[in-house]
């Protein structure tokens, strides 16, 4: 059950936390951002919500068998961690910062939260994945 709780925390951060952080003066309402940057911000907000809903769906969906449950947890690990892992990698691109100068940057204050959420998804999935023995062994 701890695995499902961690995956649910991760889902909540994707569905609520990320959009709240991005639908703000530092992002979508930032007058210094060009329209195309705001377009990609909208894309990111929507992707976060969709990944969170998918993670929640596969975390709590009733499986037909332990093999199917294992597949559901692998899907949950992927959908629950991909957004956060991509966010951690985004700082590696040229000219990027985790925080714009007018808001106190440079810096990457999101890194601990992104790491925590990714660990919730990956560790939660691992905790809740049944071991499935291969047939014939």
Image (tube, rainbow, N blue to C red):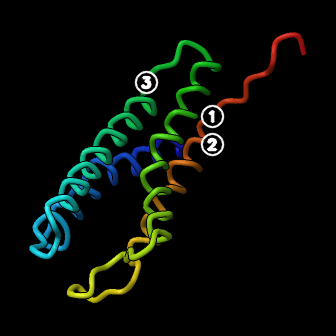
The local secondary structure at tag 2 comes to helix
Residue shown at 38%/74% (left/top)?
96
- Label 3, label 2: how far apart the Cα atoms are: 16 Å
Query: Is 37 displayed left or right of 90 in the figure?
Result: left
- Where residue 109 sits in the image (x, y, percent)? 38, 78
The local secondary structure at tag 1 comes to loop
Residue shown at 40%/44% (left/top)?
8
The local secondary structure at tag 3 comes to loop
How packed mark 2 is, by other alpha carbons closer than 10 Å (few <14, some 14-19, many 20 or more), is some
Quadrant for residue 22, please give it: bottom left
Which circle marks residue 126 in the picture? Answer: 2
Look at mark 1 in the image and give the residue it sits on: 129
Query: Is 51 displayed left or right of 25 in the figure?
Result: right
- Where residue 93 sits in the image (x, y, percent)? 46, 68
Residue shown at 46%/56% (left/top)?
86
Q: Is the residue under label 2 in contact with that under label 1 (CB below 8 Å)?
A: yes
Query: Is 54 displayed left or right of 25 in the figure?
Result: right
- Label 1, label 2: how far apart the Cα atoms are: 5 Å
Q: Relative to 18, does residue 124 appear above or below in the rendering?
A: above
Which circle marks residue 22 in the picture? Answer: none
- Label 3, label 1: how far apart the Cα atoms are: 13 Å
* Of the pair 133 and 24, the residue shown nearer to us: 24
Q: Relative to 56, does residue 104 appear above or below in the rendering?
A: below
């Amino acid at each position: 059950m701890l695995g499902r709780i961690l995956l649910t925390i991760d889902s909540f951060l994707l569905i609520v936390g990320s959009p709240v952080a991005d639908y703000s003066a530092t992002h979508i309402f930032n007058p210094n951002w060009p329209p195309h940057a705001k377009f990609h911000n909208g894309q990111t907000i929507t992707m976060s919500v969709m990944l969170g809903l998918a993670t929640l769906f596969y975390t709590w969906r009733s499986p037909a068998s332990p093999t199917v449950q294992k597949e559901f947890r692998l899907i949950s690990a992927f959908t629950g961690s991909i957004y956060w892992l991509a966010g951690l990698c985004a700082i590696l691109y040229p000219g990027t910062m985790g925080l714009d100068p007018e808001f106190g940057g440079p810096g990457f204050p999101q890194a601990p939260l992104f790491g925590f959420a990714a660990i919730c998804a990956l560790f939660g999935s691992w905790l809740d994945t049944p071991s499935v023995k291969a047939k014939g062994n």
